[in-house]
Image (cartoon, rainbow, N blue to C red):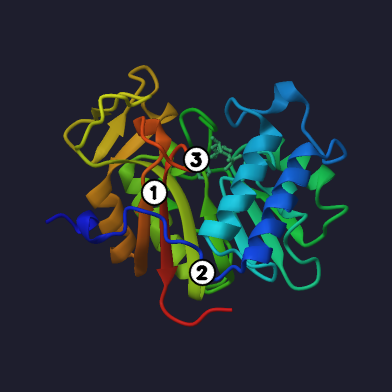
Amino acid sequence: MTATLALKQILPEPGWMSPTEAVELGRLAESVQNNRFMPHPPPDSIYVGDGDYRAIGAEFLGHFVRLGRLKRHHRMLDIGCGIGRMAVPLTQYLDSENASYDGVDPVLEGIVWCTQTITPAYPNFRFQRLDIAHPLYNPEGSLPGNQVQFGFADGSFDFISMVSVATHLPPDEIVVYLKEVSRLLAPGGRLFLTAFAIDGRSTGQERLRFQRWREGPGWYAIEEAPLAAAGVDEAFLVEAARDAGLAVETLSRGHWRGIEAEHYQDLLLATKGEGGR
Ligand SMILES: C[S@@+](CC[C@H](N)C(=O)[O-])C[C@H]1O[C@@H](n2cnc3c(N)ncnc32)[C@H](O)[C@@H]1O
């Protein structure tokens, strides 16, 4: 039996939210999506993928809270924060007194837009550019991805997200990031990570066709640019999280596989130790 078979395949019903809270969350996500006063980067500067910037941000606000149990007072780290697609909606959820949001990313333009647009109104939202090398996003970067150390103290965060970031990293970098995530999470803190977790099963309806990368645990869907859409063996991902000291709760399969799901990429939820705020 592989490690993953022991995991819940279906997302748990979030019993921690009351029906009223769930309705309020739905309303918040809807208003965030429809509010034309919410900041939006110039369309030609959005480099984080196709799709509706506002709709995807609103969708993930819902996922963070409902599935990831993000709370209003949490200290959140968003690794690979891009150009604020997650941060903009979160300004309407995270508490301005007790919560904080830190976003890190190698692409300067995204960090500049976020710092100039979001931080002045929400000083508890901070953005940092890290010169991490990536063949597509930051080819001239000075810091190799498998040597990354984030400049935050141990246990600084209650919630860490990596949305559509592990889908651009090779397996050895994912291992390093998971160790950093574990170091940075406070006891009870949670990781919300999306990935293409390859499990050897096929529906025949996949929207991406992955091929193994050089007999290792990595997979690629686009030969000319392997890190444009990168997969990783599901068992490798789960073991790497566990080896890093994270308890993997759920690996929920996404609708990229041609199945019905609430989210496109696969979603890994993991917790650091016990307790938490
Ligand atoms: C598809 S975008 C997703 C951005 C953001 N999470 C979102 O969903 O809007 C991938 C992001 O990962 C960032 N990235 C690339 N390599 C990275 C690395 N080694 N460490 C952290 N972020 C990285 C890119 O600059 C880009 O912003």
**Residue type beneath disc 2:** Gly
- 239, 52: nearer the viewer: 52
Label 3 within 8 A of ligand 1 by Cβ: yes
Residue 196 pos. (x, y %): 36, 39
Residue 149 pos. (x, y %): 49, 58
Marker count (numbered): 3
Residue 214 pos. (x, y %): 20, 31
**Residue type beneath disc 1:** Asn
The residue at the far front in this view is: 19
Residue indicated by mark 2: 15
* Mark 1 residue crowding within 10 angstroms, few (<14) / some (14–19) / many (20+): some
The residue at the far top in this view is: 224
Q: Tell me the quarter of the image containing the N terminus.
A: bottom left
- 102, 1: nearer the viewer: 1
Alpha carbon distance from label 2 to label 3 = 27 Å
Label 1 residue SS = helix
At x 83% / y 41%, what residue is drawn? 38
- 242, 105: nearer the viewer: 242
The residue at the far left in this view is: 1
Depth-wise, is mark 1 or mark 3 nearer the camera? 3
**Residue type beneath disc 3:** Ser
Label 2 residue SS = loop
Label 3 residue SS = loop
Residue indicated by mark 3: 164
Q: Which mark is residue 146?
A: 1
Q: Earlier in the sequence, mark 1 or mark 3?
A: 1
Alpha carbon distance from label 1 to label 2 = 38 Å
Q: Earlier in the sequence, mark 1 or mark 2?
A: 2
| Horizontal relation, residue 213 to residue 28: left or right | left
